[in-house]
Image (tube, rainbow, N blue to C red):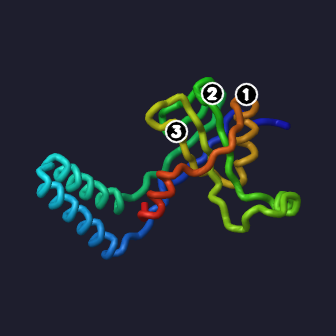
Amino acid sequence: MDMPNKLQWSALEYELKEKTPDWFWALGIVVVAGAIASILFGNFFFALLLVVSGVLMAFFSVKEPENITYELNRMGFKIKNRIYPYEKIKSFWVQKNPTDEERELHGSLPEEEIRPTLFIKSEGWLMPILSVPIEEELADNIRNIFRNHDVEEEKMKEHFSDAVMEFLGF
């Protein structure tokens, strides 16, 4: 099989979800109530932290997502200008929708659509698992490139914090 030297794609930083005025009212009520309770308990720093956090949440909830360029090349995995060398990547997983043949073979696969995603477990302590949107047609090539660079394949799924953020509308 002929493998490409470089595979490049781009995707939005995150999926922008429309927020209703009720969402902003709920955010404001929670922030103000928490700040008032913190002040009543004498914790002024936490009250300030809640207010600043609420303002930042409101700001980031309306911010337009950036279009990010991703690249797999001979040196490693590149996000914008940051490169993760293959040697620093502990493992990876390519999540994609199962084919009809895979559904027939396994029988019990879920019918819902799965967002094609590349998960990368790196040596970084701040973001040990990266979650990168991919195009379905690139999934097999991405998997082959990582395997050709002797990166371990390890089944991973969406982190709990990502599910919480999805629930909150982010």
Indicate the secondary structure of the residue bearing disc 1. loop
Badge 3 is on which residue? 79
Amino acid type shown at disc 1: Asp
Q: Quadrant of residue 72?
A: top right
Work out whether residue 166 or residue 18 is closer to the camera in this orientation and state it: 166
In the rendered view, tell whether residue 29 sits above or below residue 94. Answer: below
* Relative image position of residue 46 (x, y in whole percent): 20, 49
Q: Earlier in the sequence, mark 2 or mark 1?
A: 2
Badge 2 is on which residue? 86
Badge 1 is on which residue? 150
Name the residue rendered at 20%, 64% in the picture: 33
Amino acid type shown at disc 2: Tyr
Name the residue rendered at 36%, 74% in the picture: 20
Q: Earlier in the sequence, mark 2 or mark 3?
A: 3
Indicate the secondary structure of the residue bearing disc 2. helix
**Separation of marks 2 and 1 at Cα, in angstroms:** 8 Å
Residue 42 lies left or right of residue 55; in this view the side is left
Residues tagged 2 and 1 counted as in contact (Cβ below 8 A): yes
* Relative image position of residue 113 (x, y in whole percent): 67, 65
